[in-house]
């Protein structure tokens, strides 16, 4: 009961205080009356009454303490005091909050992304038991073939269950209105091994995955079921037609399960046996293997076992292949056993390292901003020495002083965190916009908890040191000197040096990424990507060559006739990052020269080209001609080669157009030389490439069609869509995209690093400059007397200015000494992300040092100017 | 003591209580008057007395305290407790004789 009253009393303490005063006053008055009645004088009566009462103040204090909850009241009072103090010093408060917001905000934003991509476990049972088998080597990365999966699935000694799945892909769903949904093909044990229950109906099981094309069933995802069917249980038994294949819906998966791919979520699952295309072919790579390991079996054991198994498997499949070069490429494949609990993510593959780098960078930003705020707090502490000394002499304990100082720090940290979280929301959205497939990132409880934790950490980091330092004040000295001399500003200087060191690392990283980016941009792509739109046609597997060429040529003719189109052509593979096709060739010797050939380990890129393919994409022909309409299936076999090819196989050949190649059984004349085109992306050196007229080759393939136009890309895309819609419905027209956009996208990671790096670099530089200014200005003020004396004794004003600037430079150099080696170490960690640079790129480091020195000079400008104007007489008088 | 005083005297203000206690104990207890107020606070927090502002005989504004029902019960409890203590002690002392 009394506890409740105490809490109540806390809230009304003001009024209760007044009541007590009144009560005591009344008591004293009545006692006075009594004494006066006995004959004392008014003054004597008053004094006697007071004596009779005892200590008024003491009584009131005991009363108050008993009345409320003391520590809570003290804390409330300290908090109010801290709040007032911060409001009065707006500049300090603003600077501190901005610094903290940057550090906390950046940290939270990056952490949100990292968590979403890299740390979140799949909502399956026991995600820690899952592993994925990631295949590297030829023919794509990550996925393998179905026969390989079957081999792995035999190893029940290692695994409780092994799943095969395709990647999540778009399929066309027929209906009153065609819609595109995401589909994942799965082995029969998928749901069982992952431990996913059903919502309604039943799920795909082992019996639904035995015979190819014999199990037309599908399971919907919970989200899709809600979205499209409104949660109607009658969906079970309905038929959906995916890419012209009717499937019967047999059930819906449990709520909350969204597949195993982080970046993409399937709307429906179908058995692997329903795959449209080869299933059991060893050369068809499309199956991702996810397995649940047996408890007690470690990942190292699995890795070792898989290495052996893969060797055996590759031997069985490729060991007897007659082509040596092919065989050696096949045998070089590897399997990496990776943690499966965090799901599969293409984005993580591409951006994982960069995000880790950014996380480390923002940790540095946080440290730098904490150092900055600590410096500000220290400066404020120095300014309040007099006030603190007064409090010490009035009986404040060191503990109370530290507590009060910490309150101020925590208030700042809280305000900084609030501002930081706002910044984080905005920042996360900006970052996600960078990614090629923006996905939903919701800030969740973990992230907020993380932010709270680093806030408290930050508050303690920058608050504790200065708090302890400030409370160690000698009261008498403080009262005497006030805001003047402080015996040691060593701590502040050390903090600034640390801050400069952090900034050096950040600026160096920014410089490296920026330099790398500029190198990337200066790489010649080899063709004029602007105004070119690319797309592909996909035909049903069964269609023969004749069935494919007809519609393709009709489409091209239609596009050529459309307004705004300058040129149309086609090729295989596509011009930029569409994979590559390889072949072995022989260069036929001229006269008696020995023939050069690459039947060893080398492969030459083989590109099929429609008429004027190279000119359509804007590549420059150095010699001879492009593939032309006159090159038909019956005319002479010709080819165009690129300059890399010449350098490798025909160096010093004055007339390459006179030479011939042998590809397979054909003799091919070289009719043109084209400049190197970066088909495999900007980072890869162009390989020797041979362009052969498409009509002169066999085989079925997906033509990649390129359209050059004089109008805006959107208009071209609309034209393509319109004409593509005229094609028979079995032909899929992929999304037309400007090639320029493909190029930009391939540089996304680098752009991300360069942009964010630059941002952090600038922030770090600004923080360093502010910190330097504070310390240098303080130092200059402290030595103003010395400077006055020097000037009075005849020193040039310039020498006094130099004193100030030198102070700043000394701090910067100290920071560089610490920071540059650290930067180099950091650079080596990120070397794999750089292009055309070594970790010890002299240019970047030189620029970094220069930038910091410039910041130091800039910071010293104002104090230096004040120093140059020092009036010796005034200074000496103020002694 | 405060409770008993209030019981006999009826509602009183702090000064009156102090004087009365001094009087009854015939000056044997001379505490500083100020110590009364924290004690009054504790009794009020426990709900045994209730305070209200009023006007004193000398036309001053003063806070008057009154015994509550819980307070009356408390007096009985404490009186009984004291009596028992006295009884036990006297038995010991008698024995010792």
Image (spheres, helix red, strand yellow):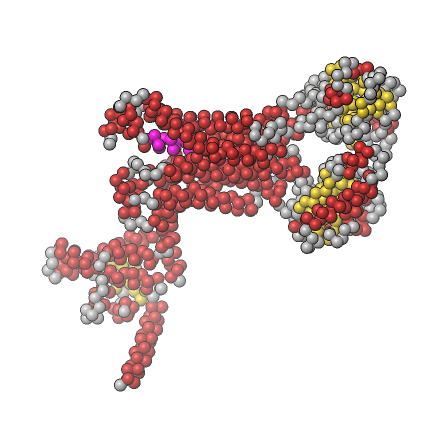
Magenta-colored stretch includes residue A772: yes
Q: Is residue A642 visible?
A: no
The stretch in magenta equals A771-781
On the image, the x and y values in percent for residue A259 come to 69, 45
Q: Quadrant of the N terminus of chain B?
A: bottom left
Residue at the spot 30% in from the left edge and 53% down from the top edge: A17
In this rendering, the answer to whether B22 lies above or below A734 is below
Image-based side of A557 in relation to A836, left or right: right
Callout count: 0
* Dominant SS type (magenta): helix
Image-based side of A632 in relation to A720, left or right: right
Magenta-colored stretch includes residue B34: no
On the image, the x and y values in percent for residue A234 come to 75, 49
Residue at the spot 76% in from the left edge and 24% down from the top edge: A689
Image-based side of A716 in relation to A52, left or right: right
On the image, the x and y values in percent for residue A133 come to 72, 44
């Amino acid at each position: 009961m009394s506890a409740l009253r105490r809490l109540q009393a806390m809230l009304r303490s003001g009024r209760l205080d007044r009541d007590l005063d009144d009560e005591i006053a009344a008591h004293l008055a009545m006692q006075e009356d009594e004494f006066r009645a006995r004959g004392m004088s008014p003054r004597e009566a008053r004094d006697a009454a007071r004596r009779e009462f005892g200590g008024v103040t003491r009584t009131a204090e005991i009363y108050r303490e008993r009345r409320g909850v003391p520590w809570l009241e003290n804390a409330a009072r300290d908090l109010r005091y801290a709040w007032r103090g911060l409001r009065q010093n707006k500049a300090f408060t603003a600077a501190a909050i901005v610094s903290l917001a940057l550090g906390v905000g950046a940290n939270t934003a990056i952490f949100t992304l990292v968590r979403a991509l890299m740390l979140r476990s799949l909502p399956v049972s026991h995600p820690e038991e899952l592993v994925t088998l990631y295949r590297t080597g030829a023919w794509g990365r990550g996925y393998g073939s179905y026969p390989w999966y079957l081999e792995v699935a035999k190893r029940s000694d290692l695994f409780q269950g092994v799943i095969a799945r395709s990647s999540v892909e778009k399929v066309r769903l027929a209906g009153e209105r065609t819609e595109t949904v995401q589909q994942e093909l799965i082995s029969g044990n998928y749901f069982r091994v992952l431990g996913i229950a059903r919502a309604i109906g039943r799920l795909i099981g082992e019996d639904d995955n035995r015979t190819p094309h014999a199990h037309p069933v599908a399971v919907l995802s919970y989200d899709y079921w809600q979205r499209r069917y409104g949660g109607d249980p009658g969906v079970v038994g309905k038929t959906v037609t995916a890419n012209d294949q009717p499937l019967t819906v047999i059930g819906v998966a449990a709520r909350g399960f969204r597949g195993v791919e982080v970046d993409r979520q399937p709307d429906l699952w179908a058995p692997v046996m329903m795959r449209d295309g080869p299933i059991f072919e060893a050369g068809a790579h499309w199956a991702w293997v996810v397995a649940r390991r047996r408890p007690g079996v470690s990942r190292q054991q699995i890795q070792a076992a898989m290495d052996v198994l893969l060797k055996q498997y590759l031997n069985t499949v490729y060991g007897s292949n007659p082509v040596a070069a092919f065989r050696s490429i096949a045998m070089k494949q590897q399997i990496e056993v990776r943690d499966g609990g965090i799901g599969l993510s293409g984005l993580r593959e591409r951006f994982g390292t960069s995000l880790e780098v950014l996380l480390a960078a923002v940790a540095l930003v946080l440290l730098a901003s904490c150092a900055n705020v600590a410096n500000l707090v220290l400066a404020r502490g120095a300014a309040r020495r007099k006030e603190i000394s007064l409090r010490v002499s009035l009986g404040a304990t060191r503990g109370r002083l530290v507590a009060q100082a910490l309150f101020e720090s925590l208030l700042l940290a809280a305000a900084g965190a609030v501002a930081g979280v706002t910044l984080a929301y905005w920042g996360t959205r900006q970052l996600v916009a960078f990614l090629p497939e923006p996905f939903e990132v919701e800030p969740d409880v973990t992230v907020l908890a993380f932010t709270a934790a680093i806030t408290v950490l930050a508050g303690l980091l920058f608050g504790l040191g200065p708090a302890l330092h400030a409370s160690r004040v000698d009261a008498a000295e403080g009262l005497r000197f006030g805001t003047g001399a402080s015996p040691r500003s060593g701590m502040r200087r050390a903090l600034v040096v640390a801050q400069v060191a952090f900034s050096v690392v950040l600026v160096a990283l920014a410089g490296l990424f920026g330099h790398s980016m500029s190198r990337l941009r200066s790489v010649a792509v080899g063709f004029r990507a602007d105004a070119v739109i690319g797309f592909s046609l996909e035909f049903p597997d069964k269609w023969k060559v004749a069935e494919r060429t007809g519609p393709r040529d009709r489409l091209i003719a239609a596009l050529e006739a459309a307004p705004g189109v300058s040129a149309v052509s086609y090729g295989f593979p596509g011009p930029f990052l569409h994979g590559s096709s390889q072949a072995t060739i022989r260069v036929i010797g001229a006269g008696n020269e020995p023939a050069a050939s690459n039947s060893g380990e080398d492969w030459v890129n083989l590109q099929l080209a429609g008429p004027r393919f190279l000119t359509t994409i804007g590549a420059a022909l150095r010699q001879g001609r492009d593939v032309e309409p006159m090159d038909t299936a019956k005319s002479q076999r010709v080819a165009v080669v690129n300059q890399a090819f010449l350098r490798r196989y025909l160096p010093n050949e004055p007339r390459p157009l006179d030479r011939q190649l042998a590809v397979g059984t054909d003799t091919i004349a070289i009719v043109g030389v084209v400049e190197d085109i970066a088909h495999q992306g900007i980072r890869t050196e162009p390989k020797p490439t041979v362009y052969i007229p498409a009509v002169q080759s066999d085989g079925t393939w997906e033509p990649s069609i390129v359209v050059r136009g004089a109008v805006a890309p959107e208009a071209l895309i609309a034209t393509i869509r319109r004409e593509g819609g005229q094609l028979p419905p079995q032909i899929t027209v992929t999304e037309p995209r400007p090639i320029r956009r493909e190029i930009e996208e391939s540089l996304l990671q680098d752009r991300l690093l360069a942009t964010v790096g630059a941002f952090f670099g600038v922030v770090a530089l600004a923080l360093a400059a502010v910190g330097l200014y504070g310390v240098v200005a303080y130092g200059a003020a402290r030595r103003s007397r010395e400077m006055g004396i020097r000037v009075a004794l005849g020193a040039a004003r310039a020498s006094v200015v130099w004193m100030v600037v030198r102070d700043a430079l000394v701090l910067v150099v100290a920071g560089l000494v610490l920071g540059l080696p650290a930067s180099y170490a950091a650079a080596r960690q990120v070397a794999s992300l750089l292009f055309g640079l070594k970790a010890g790129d002299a240019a970047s480091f030189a620029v970094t040092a220069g930038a910091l020195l410039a910041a130091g000079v800039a910071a010293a400008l104002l104090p230096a100017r004040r120093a140059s104007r020092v009036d010796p007489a005034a200074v000496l008088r103020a002694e | 003591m405060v409770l008993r005083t209030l019981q006999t005297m009826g509602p009183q203000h702090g000064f009156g209580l102090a004087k009365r206690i001094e009087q009854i104990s015939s000056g044997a207890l001379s505490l500083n008057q100020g110590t009364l107020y924290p004690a009054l606070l504790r009794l009020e927090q426990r709900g045994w007395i209730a305070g209200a502002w009023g006007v004193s005989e000398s036309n001053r504004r003063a806070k008057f305290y009154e015994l509550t029902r819980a307070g009356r019960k408390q007096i009985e409890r404490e009186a009984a407790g004291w009596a028992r203590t006295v009884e036990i002690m006297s038995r010991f002392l008698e024995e010792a004789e």
